[in-house]
């Protein structure tokens, strides 16, 4: 695990100035910085993100003096530093004293911003399903490592310069192989599994529920919790519609409501409904989820020959009409 010099990080963030701040929340603050690397005669720069607790003046010598933010960052450092590389998990670059964490910089914001804030057009339907697959592959990877994320949500899915999705924020993550006592239930309202009420209820199916909410969010472009709507919960709104087969009322933007995608939409939404089922044991595992999404992405290709045939007929008909007009 690479250890950065605290004074260097302090300098490149202009003393953790507001001008370098790019995000803040329950985890603390995130700053953008430019790091210079020197390797013999090679010199290069890299833009990074630096996560820090909101209070850097806490005494780190006594565990009782640590803030909740500092504990989350400490946990995040421990979890992320233990993980091998995965293309859809935010890359951990190193840490520094006072619980600073250095990770790769993600210039294109979060999935939450893309779906609910940005004025730009929504990504194409196939791109959105590709994002869903990338998130699922990331969580599948974590579960293979014995890690439960516990805070899967659209705000914790970030995009790199190529619009590849990466799962971030491991402050609440739990290592099942760590031999430690399981912590009290935690997560984000709207994404938190309602069956996760006691520490012993924690399982990989806890992440499955949260992922199901994100999948509904991707398909519908509706927020997980929207108090301006009734019902406010995306789960309470979508699941009855899925059971009634009213798929077109759920799909939002990006061509998702077109007939060519209907079979794919139906499969995706049925799987999302299974993910958020109150019957924990009936929820799919991420191996099954990734397999199903790959199959869903192939669904439109099945109807491609039919659409090509229809297109050819239309072209032939137009040519006949044109020749007919020319002979008159």
Image (tube, rainbow, N blue to C red):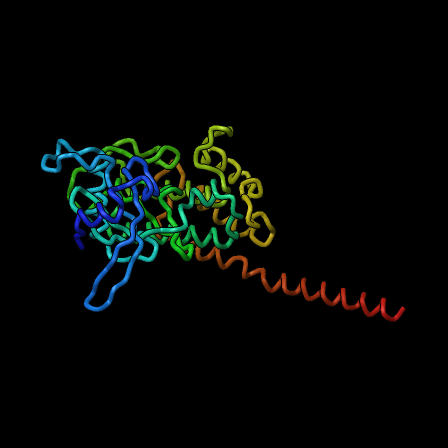
Residue 303, quarter of the rendered image: bottom right
Residue that sits furthest to the right in the current view: 328
Residue for point 49% across, 29% down: 231
**124 versus 242 height, above or below:** below
- Residue 127 position, x and y percent, is 48, 54
Residue for point 41% across, 53% down: 133
Residue 93 visible to an observer of this rendering: yes
Specify whether 121 is left or right of 314.
Answer: left
Residue 59, quarter of the rendered image: top left
In this rendering, the count of numbered labels is: 0
- Residue 289 position, x and y percent, is 39, 51
Residue 208, quarter of the rendered image: top left
Residue for point 45% across, 36% down: 235
| Quadrant of image for the N terminus | bottom left
| Quadrant of image for the C terminus | bottom right
Specify whether 57 is left or right of 303.
Answer: left
């Amino acid at each position: 695990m690479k250890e950065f010099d605290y004074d260097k990080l302090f300098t490149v963030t202009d003393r953790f100035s507001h001008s370098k701040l790019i995000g803040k929340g329950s985890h603390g603050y995130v700053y953008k910085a430019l790091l210079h690397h020197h390797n013999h005669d090679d010199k290069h720069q890299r833009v990074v993100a630096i996560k820090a607790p909101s209070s850097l003046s806490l005494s780190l010598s006594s565990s009782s003096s640590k803030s909740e933010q500092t504990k989350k960052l400490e946990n995040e450092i421990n979890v992320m530093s233990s993980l091998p590389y995965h293309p859809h998990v935010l890359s951990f670059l190193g840490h520094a004293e006072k619980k600073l964490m250095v990770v790769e910089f993600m210039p294109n914001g979060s999935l939450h911003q893309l779906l609910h804030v940005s004025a730009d057009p929504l990504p194409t339907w196939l791109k959105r399903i590709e994002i869903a697959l990338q998130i699922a592959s990331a969580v599948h990877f974590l579960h293979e490592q014995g890690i439960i994320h516990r805070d899967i949500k659209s705000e914790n899915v970030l995009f790199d310069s190529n619009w590849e999705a990466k799962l971030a924020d491991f402050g609440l993550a739990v290592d099942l192989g760590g031999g430690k006592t399981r912590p009290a239930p935690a997560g984000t309202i709207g994404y938190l599994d309602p069956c996760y009420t006691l520490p012993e209820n924690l399982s990989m199916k806890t992440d499955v529920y949260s992922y199901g909410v994100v999948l509904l969010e991707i398909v519908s472009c509706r927020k997980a919790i929207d108090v301006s709507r009734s019902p406010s919960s995306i789960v309470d709104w979508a699941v009855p519609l899925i059971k009634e087969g009213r798929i077109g009322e759920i799909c939002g933007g990006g061509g998702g409501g077109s007939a060519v995608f209907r079979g794919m939409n139906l499969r995706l939404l049925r799987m999302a409904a299974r993910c958020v089922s109150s019957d924990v044991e009936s929820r799919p595992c991420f191996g099954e989820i990734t397999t199903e999404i790959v199959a869903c992405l192939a669904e439109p290709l099945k109807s491609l020959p039919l659409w090509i045939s229809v297109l050819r007929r239309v072209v032939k008909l137009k040519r006949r009409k044109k020749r007919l007009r020319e002979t008159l």
